[in-house]
Amino acid sequence: MSRRRRRYFFFFAAILAGLALGIIYGWVINPVVFRNTGMDTLRLDYKTDYVLMVAELYQSEGDLASALTRIAYLEASSPLAFVTTCIDYAEQHDYTREDIDLMWHLASDIDNALRTGN
Amino acid sequence: MNDQTQELRITPQPEEKKHHWYLLTGIIIGIAVGLIVTWLLFPVVYQDTSPASLSPAYKEIYRSTIAQVYAATGNLERAASRLALLEDEDIIYALGAQAQRALAEGQEKEARALALLASEIQAVIPVETSE
């Protein structure tokens, strides 16, 4: 191998070593720590539990506007589709019938409100 | 003349010592490429996080919702397991402090729910200092 070729070889090897150092620093030495996140970033099981809480409160208070405000922390654009997604998750993960019914009740009232425009 | 010429040919070239700078240059380029990839091309996207990672303001909303649900349903076991998700160092202190803030802001219903949950959990959890 000529001197010129050897230098190119080690130059690109050094680039790879630099990449490896960056990745090791970012993933092992100083990995990302999730802090100060918003509620829209929560995992679906936590979101589903939150929607269940909203449904429990809605059952008690009967205040749909408050329920929609609480759901907006998780998903503002389409609350009905979002609640339905959470119900699907709950049905697939052995939530009790009572909890699922509470969420269905909330979804049904959101649907009615959207249809009537109230 | 001939002798002098031979001496010049034998003397080693000083540029041999400069050779290793390209290695440092390569490493710096590698790190720069790594940062461009991780910060610009594929930056970290926050998703699938847990309630413990929420910002303090969102933790307060989450905690308040838990307390209000407890006030409505009376299910302490469920409220305690939900509060545990927030990973507060001192659950009772967090509830009490938030209740005081809510009271100061005129949110009486929320303050009452938070205080109620704090007192119920305090009654159930053994106080470590008394042992």
Image (cartoon, rainbow, N blue to C red):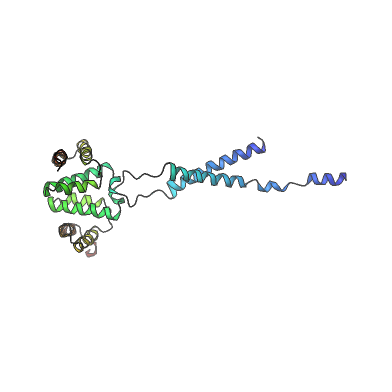
Q: Viewer-proximal residue, B1 or A98? A: B1
Q: Viewer-proximal residue, A60 or A64? A: A64
Residue B104 % position (x, y): 20, 64
For this view, does B1 lie left or right of residue A55?
Answer: right
Q: Viewer-proximal residue, A82 or A101? A: A82
Residue A74 sits above or below residue B125 on the image: above
For this view, does A114 lie left or right of residue A12?
Answer: left
Residue B42 % position (x, y): 42, 41
Q: How many marks?
A: 0
Q: Viewer-proximal residue, B60 or A17? A: B60
Residue A12 % position (x, y): 57, 39
Quarter of the picture holding the N terminus of chain A:
top right
- Look at 87% across and 44% down and name the residue there: B2
For this view, does B31 lie left or right of residue B62?
Answer: right
Residue B117 % position (x, y): 17, 56
Quarter of the picture holding the C terminus of chain A:
top left
In this view, which residue lies farthest toward the front? A117
